[in-house]
Every structure is written in C-alpha cells, then in structure tokens.
Amino acid sequence: MATPVETLQGLIEQIGPRLRLRWLTPLPEQPLTLLGATPSGAAQSLVGSLNCIHPNRLQVLGHAEITHLDDLGAAAFRDTVERLFAARPAAVIFARDIEPSASFFEVAERTGTPLLGSPKSDDEIVDRLQYFLTYALAERTTLHGVFLEVLGMGVLLVGDPGIGKSELALEMVVRGHRLIADDAPEVARIGPETLQGSCPPLLRDFLEVRGLGVLNVRAMFGEGAVQQREQLNLIVNMRSFDGAALAHMDRLRGSLSTRTILGVVVPEITLPVAPGRNLAVLLETAVRNQILRVRGYDAGDDLIDRQARSIDETTQCMTPTPSV
C-alpha cells in the first residue's frame, strides 16, 4: 500500500521516478496540498485529462488535448487556458515530453501553478496516478486486534487483552494461513464499500505471544506465512463464555452481526472462548460459512425452508381426499 501523501512534493518524491516526472517550473518553496482548500475543492477529481467543467486537481495534457487547444484559435485557446488555471489545479502535467507554449508558462507563473513533464503517455500517467492516490489519500484508522488472511478472506480477530487472539493467530499460521498484522492493523477505505488492512512497517512480520515474547513469523515459517495486505471481510470477536451463557446463544443463526468502520459495514461474529473448544477449527468453519453467505447461501435459511416444506408435505398427506 502506498505511503500516505498529502502534498504535491510528496507525490513527486514517491511516484515521480516511476513516471519520470520532472519540474518544468521552479520547485515550489511551500508544500502544495493535493486536496482542495475548500470543501468544493476537496470533492474534485484528483487526476484526469483536460477538463474545465469539472476540473481535476492534477490536469494531464497529451497530444490529443494540445491538438484540440491548437484548433480552437488564438482567442479560444487563451480563454480555455485561463479557465484551466483558474480552477487552481495542484499541477498541470504534460505527457510524451510535450513542451508547453509560452502561454502556459505565463499563466502558470501568474497563478503559481507548477508545470510538470513526463515522457510517458497521458493514459499511463492518469492510470498510475489514480491507482497510487486511491491508496495514498484513502481515509484511514488503526484498529486493535490481529489481522489474518484465512481461505482468501481478510479476518480481524478482536477481543479483550489476554483472550487468546495471538495464540489463535499463531495456530492459524501453523495451519497454513497468513499473518498480516498483529496488535495495530491499519485499515484504509479504498472504495465505497471496500476496506483494506495492512501492517505498519515497524510491526511487519512480528507477532507477540504471551509467554513466548515477540516472534518473527516470516523468519520462523517462511515467506508464505505472511501477507502485506488484504481486504477486510470479517470481524471475529473472541469472548469468554461460561456454560450458561453459551447455552443461551442462538443455535440457528449463531451470533452474526455487523460493525461499521469508516462508514463501511463489516460482518461480525462472536466466537465463544471456552475450555475444550477447538478455536482454530471453529474459525476456519466461520470463514467458510461466511464465504457461503457471500455466495448467497445461508444454512439457517436452508434449514427453515426444509422444515417448511416438510410441514407442507405432512399436511397434504394428512388432508383427506374428498369423496366423489
């Protein structure tokens, strides 16, 4: 996942070498924010080709855009360039080593807008910047728990300290699943209904297990035991239950609920922690069951339907046939 960036200078520092971006105007002395200074500016599209109606924060001009501007005529050309810079973009990027005309430099200097150049195509510049900025500017939060990849799903183990999250995570790694983050996974909203979790660089590969201390999972179990990031698909809340509390749980539906993180609703189940329960098997089963739910199958609904059909069939058999 890309490192968070908020300024144009930070963006150029991180992705500039890959796109071979260069400053066509002097490097700004002050940091230039990538987000607008006003709420309306913050709602702007971050990057795109020439657009004066819904201006982008990063305007990318290729041969098609330059040809269009040249075909407008001198007056219309000047007016369009003025409107382009009046939207206060964070920068204007010229693709394919296009050398901007003097008009661009004049308006750029007057408005304090940086000009950048790249030998890459405008499509590649837009695609790479959009992908990078989706992560770099994503809304983020840090959660407490252990984040794992289990059967292709991102699973966050939460619960009270000492409940056994790290021990369960270690057992899942031994069973072939992968650790993403222990203690403080970072979650970013990368889409309207998509959360992605990763591990802060300082904690990457480490898992703290009470009694054993800090373990390097990558060093102990190999590259296949860890993963950098995964979408957050399921939260498993580990709670201690006595026999009476366990008996009162819904035996048909279990403990399925939801939790909202960064505005995204995430399925959550409660995993009872009690002596004699094989938590690793239960966790794998919970994940498999959630996969079935995502695919549209619910065992509880299936059982209810079977019972209803059985009752209907029994009722029909018991109904006497009218005599003719």
Image (tube, rainbow, N blue to C red):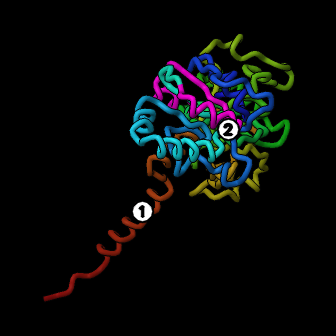
Q: Which one is in front, 319 or 277?
A: 277
Q: Residue furthest front?
A: 74
- Residue 26, given in percent of the width and then of the height, sits at 71, 23
Identify whether 205 is placed above or below 263: above
Magenta stretch containing residue 68, yes or no?
A: no
Mark number, residue 137: 2
Residue under the image location 57 percent in, 40 percent down: 287
SS majority, magenta? helix
Q: What amino acid does circle 1 point to?
A: Asp
Residue under the image location 48 percent in, 52 percent down: 299
Q: Which one is in front, 76 or 47?
A: 76
**Quadrant of the rendered structure where residue 2 is?**
top right
Q: In this view, does 47 lie to the left or right of 39?
A: left
Visible residue check, residue 294: yes
Point out the stretch of residues depicted in magenta.
100-129
Identify whether 223 is placed above or below 87: above
Residue under the image location 54 percent in, 32 percent down: 151
Q: What amino acid does circle 2 point to?
A: Leu
Mark number, residue 290: none
Identify whether 153 is placed above or below 79: above
Q: In this view, does 94 lie to the left or right of 227?
A: left
- Residue 51, given in percent of the width and then of the height, sits at 51, 45
- Check disc 1 and report its element: helix, strand or loop: helix
Q: Which residue lies furthest to the left in this view?
A: 324
Residue beneath label 1, please? 305
Q: Which one is in front, 111 or 92?
A: 111
Q: Which one is in front, 19 or 308?
A: 19
The quadrant of the rendering that contains the C terminus is bottom left
- Residue 48, given in percent of the width and then of the height, sits at 52, 38
Q: Is residue 36 left or right of residue 190?
A: right
CA distance for labels 1 and 2: 46 Å
